[in-house]
Image (cartoon, grey):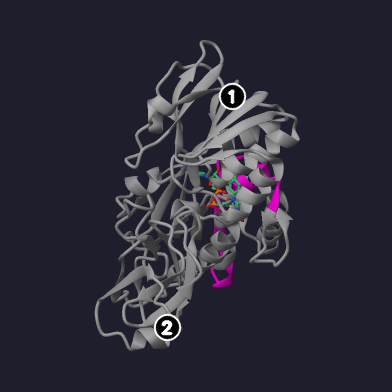
Amino acid sequence: MLDRMEGKYDVVVVGGGPAGMGAALGARDSGAERVLILDREPEAGGILWQCIHSGFGLHYFREELTGPEYAERFFEKVIDYEVDLVTNSYVSGISVDSDGTKSVRVMNEEHGMDTVNTKSVVLSMGCRERTRGSIRIPGTRPSGVLPAGLAQKIVNLKGYLPGKRIAILGSGDIGLIMARRLTLEGCKVAGVFEIMPYSNGLTRNVVQCLEDFGIPLHLSTTVAYIHGLDRVEKITVAPVSKDLKPDMSRAWDVKCDTLLLSIGLIPENELSLSLGIQMDVVTGGPRVSSTLETSMPGVFASGNVLHVHDLVDFVTRESLLAGQFAGEWAQGVRRPADNIRLVPGDNVRYCVPHSLSPEREHTIYMRCKEAMMPCRIRVGNLMERKLRFVVPAEMIIFKIKPDLLDKFHGDTLRIDILPAEKGKRHD
Ligand SMILES: Cc1cc2nc3c(=O)[nH]c(=O)nc-3n(C[C@H](O)[C@H](O)[C@H](O)COP(=O)(O)OP(=O)(O)OC[C@H]3O[C@@H](n4cnc5c(N)ncnc54)[C@H](O)[C@@H]3O)c2cc1C
């Protein structure tokens, strides 16, 4: 397999999840001839293989697919488009030579270390789950405390159950999906405990995974202590005050043998950091221009490594674009630098990309800090859009047309989310 990797590639994509596959297809569509995907797992598809529930592809294919079905569609295209795909290959480093060539260091379990040369790179390494250590839950250290996505892998890919009586900390989508999955497998899910006053998952998942199965969701509540020597025996949960501190005077115990953690995802950016790429401290991903190029010329990023997405459909759209621009870059196309900086204003946690150019239409991905309803998004003095509501768990996506940006004369465009104005119509 690795003999295929000889010579110089146009585009090397690191990670073969939905973002990596989309980027490779985008690169081929742009005319790039030699495109390679490297993935450390035995198969491309990323996290999708373990997501056997439906709900994928509603936006992109207008069909409801399971994760594996969604992955399969792109996998077949990757083969049709004659993209080189090398799996079981971990990318351990990337360096940039003086002529701009990128050297990608690959570790393959059969063939050992190798280096691939390429004109451009797309980073699509996805993200990993936060663990008990990242939030320091007090208590003993028994077995039975694990991230919800890992539990999903154990159940759906290995065929084992992580326990019988389950508690879940965090109401992110993975926790919600696992509450339903484990109930269907005959486990008792004692409850989902969420420190914030709102769920961190999609509304549809709260309804379909908890409410439909009578699983209680305790908002503004956290796990204050884990009990058990060899195995989890119970947890102490407590309501939290406004400053998110547990109020132990109102704490109670929940009997369980397993505690799943659905407390957030961290973009896997060790490679980006080692390249010296500028990062966004809020998203945990690289700062990117409107062509999804990082601060390192010829290195692009897309998918969960850039910012955590709720839906794979938007990962696909973003990565097709990243691949297209990476492919063009490899063919010598150099676009003028963006001249408008996008900055988060009132109630905006982040927005991606970080800069814009009046050259083309842009899709802006952003999240709010706090729930608001009804509200409006204000983009400088260029446009306003009314929204029924915004919640931190649901990404906000909208387009800005080039004719609007043509009218803009500043160099910094601020985006705010504001309460709706009564009686006023917004475009
Ligand atoms: C439990 C769960 C439920 C979900 N449910 C839904 C849903 O119902 N609907 C929906 O639309 N979306 C859902 N999603 C979201 C969707 O699956 C993700 O948005 C999508 O998989 C992100 O794609 P990605 O390619 O960025 O990352 P990933 O899918 O994580 O792929 C990253 C790939 O990069 C590889 N990689 C990382 N580092 C290296 C390296 N150094 N060298 C080589 N390879 C590397 C990994 O092996 C992996 O294959 C769900 C996600 C999870 C976790």
Q: Nearer the viewer, residue 187 or 264?
A: 187
Separation of disc 1 and disc 2 at Cα?
51 Å
Left or right: where 177 falls relative to 359: right
* Residue 86 in view: no
Query: Against 124, is 59 above or below?
Result: below
Q: Is residue 46 magenta?
A: yes
Magenta residue span = 28-54
Q: How far from the left and from the top, in percent, is residue 80?
A: 70, 62
Q: How far from the left and from the top, in percent, is residue 132?
A: 44, 29
Secondary structure at badge 1 equals: strand
Query: Against 360, is 225 above or below?
Result: above
**What residue does disc 1 label?**
258
Check the picture and name the quadrant holding the N terminus.
top right
At a point 46% along the width and 17% down the height, the residue shown is 141
Name the disc covering residue 363, or none.
Answer: none
Query: Against 143, is 300 above or below?
Result: below
- At label 2, the amino acid type is Lys
Total marks placed: 2
Q: Quadrant of residue 392?
A: bottom left
Secondary structure at badge 2 equals: loop
**What residue does disc 2 label?**
424
Give the class, few, some or many, for how many residues have Cα within 10 Å of label 2's Cα (few <14, many ≥20). few
> Which marked residue is nearer to the observer: mark 1 or mark 2?
2
Closer to the chain start, of discs 1 and 2, is: 1
* Residue 223 in view: yes
Q: How far from the left and from the top, in percent, is residue 50?
A: 66, 42
